[in-house]
Image (cartoon, grey):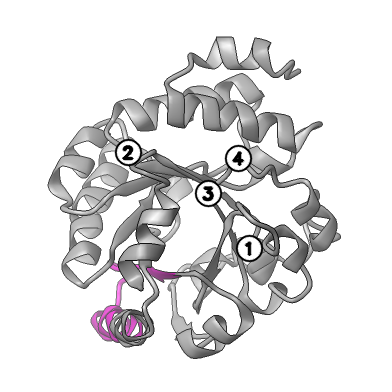
């Protein structure tokens, strides 16, 4: 079952496009995601997966309940590393949803994050323990696992420090059993993708100033060997989310140049 779900996500060996709308699990309501069912209605069927909290699946089932719909990718652990508004830095992580609960709610794929180099050996070890426990249970239930590496305080890392952390920890997550990796794009991204035996998905991170720049980031990630992308704010906080998502699929899956995709889909 795990292999079937994995192969569906990559749709006959295409690169995968996942739209993330799990931000409110850490930030509370943010622009573009105040009404999450309405946000889900704007996700285009061209994307392969939608990332959200398992508890939001019943509220957003209309995004998943038709033939050819995106797969439901659900985040299982909760980490203070994402609570920017509270200025937390320690990346304390706890299980939030069991894989069994997520599966009962309709999940197809599990996402489990891991932050290392938190400044505490005990906290790093506990984060690994949480990751491995959830990963093991998810795989026993036939769910592919996306391992997300997210460093503490990424905005204050130099490009070299960010790359060093991503390069080391993406491989560590693969060694801990992830079927895919979700992580930051770095200026030497090919080193990351070549060192991992599983597909690496590049994330969108902060909102780009323009839709063209967001598509250029996706193109750079693909050129660096990414097996796909996971975009949130850049795919949702735009005038026409579905049009941007179709452009993103063109760039990631079909190699369309970002400038051509902007013109084809009439992005502003």
Whether residue 244 sits left or right of residue 166 in the image: it is: right
Decide which of tag 1 and tag 4 comes sooner along the chain.
1
The vertical placement of 217 against 76, above or below, is above
Q: Is residue 172 visible?
A: yes
Residue 117 magenta-drawn?
Answer: yes
Q: Which mark is residue 226?
A: 2
Residue 244 spot, x, y in % from top left:
67, 30
Quadrant location, the N terminus = bottom left
The residue carrying mark 4 is 46
Q: Which mark is residue 22?
A: 1
Mark 1 surroundings within 10 Å by alpha-carbon count, few (fewer than 14), some (14 through 19), many (20 or more) = many
Picture coordinates of residue 149 (x, y %)?
Answer: 35, 60
- In the displayed structure image, the side of residue 155 where residue 206 appears, left or right: right
Q: Nearer the viewer, residue 85 or 38?
A: 38
Disc 3 to disc 2, C-alpha distance = 15 Å
Q: Secondary structure at mark 1?
A: loop
Residue sitting at x 43%, y 73%: 90
| The residue stretch that appears in magenta | 110-130
**Mark nearer the viewer, 4 or 2:** 4
Q: Within the magenta stretch, is there residue 207?
A: no
The mark closer to the camera, 3 or 1, is: 3
Give the residue displayed 22% in from the left and 47% down from the top. 164
Q: Earlier in the sequence, mark 1 or mark 2?
A: 1
Q: Secondary structure at mark 4?
A: loop
The reply, left or right, for residue 110 in relation to residue 177 is right
Label 3–label 2 contact, CB within 8 A? no
* 203, 90: nearer the viewer: 203
Q: What residue is disc 3 on?
A: 48
Q: How far is mark 3 from mark 1, CA to CA?
A: 16 Å
- The image quadrant where one finds the C terminus is top right
- Residue 150: horizontal and vertical position, in percent? 40, 59
Is there CB contact under 8 Å for labels 4 and 3?
A: no
């Amino acid at each position: 079952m795990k292999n079937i779900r994995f192969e569906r996500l990559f749709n006959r060996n295409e690169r995968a496009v996942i739209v993330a709308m799990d931000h409110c699990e850490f930030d509370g309501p943010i622009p573009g995601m105040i009404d999450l069912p309405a946000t889900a209605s704007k996700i285009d069927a061209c994307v392969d997966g939608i990332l959200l909290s398992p508890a939001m699946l019943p509220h957003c089932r209309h995004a998943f309940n038709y033939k050819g719909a995106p797969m439901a990718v659900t985040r299982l652990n909760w980490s203070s590393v994402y609570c920017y508004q509270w200025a937390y830095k320690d990346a304390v992580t706890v299980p939030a949803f069991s894989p069994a609960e997520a599966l009962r709610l309709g999940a197809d794929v599990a996402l489990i994050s891991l932050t290392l180099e938190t400044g505490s050996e005990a906290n790093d070890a506990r984060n690994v323990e949480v990751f491995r426990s959830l990963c093991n249970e998810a795989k026993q239930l036939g769910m592919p696992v996306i391992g997300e590496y997210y460093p503490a305080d990424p905005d204050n890392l130099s490009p070299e420090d960010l790359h060093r952390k991503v390069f080391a920890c993406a491989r560590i997550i693969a060694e801990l059993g992830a079927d895919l990796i979700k992580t930051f794009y770095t200026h030497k991204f090919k080193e990351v993708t070549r060192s991992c035996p599983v597909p690496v998905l590049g994330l969108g991170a902060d909102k780009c100033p323009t839709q063209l720049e967001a598509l250029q980031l996706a193109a750079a990630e693909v050129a660096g060997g990414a097996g796909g992308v996971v975009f949130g704010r850049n795919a949702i906080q735009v005038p026409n989310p579905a049009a941007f998502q179709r452009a993103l699929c063109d760039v990631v899956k079909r190699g369309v140049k970002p400038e051509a995709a902007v013109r084809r889909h009439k992005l502003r």
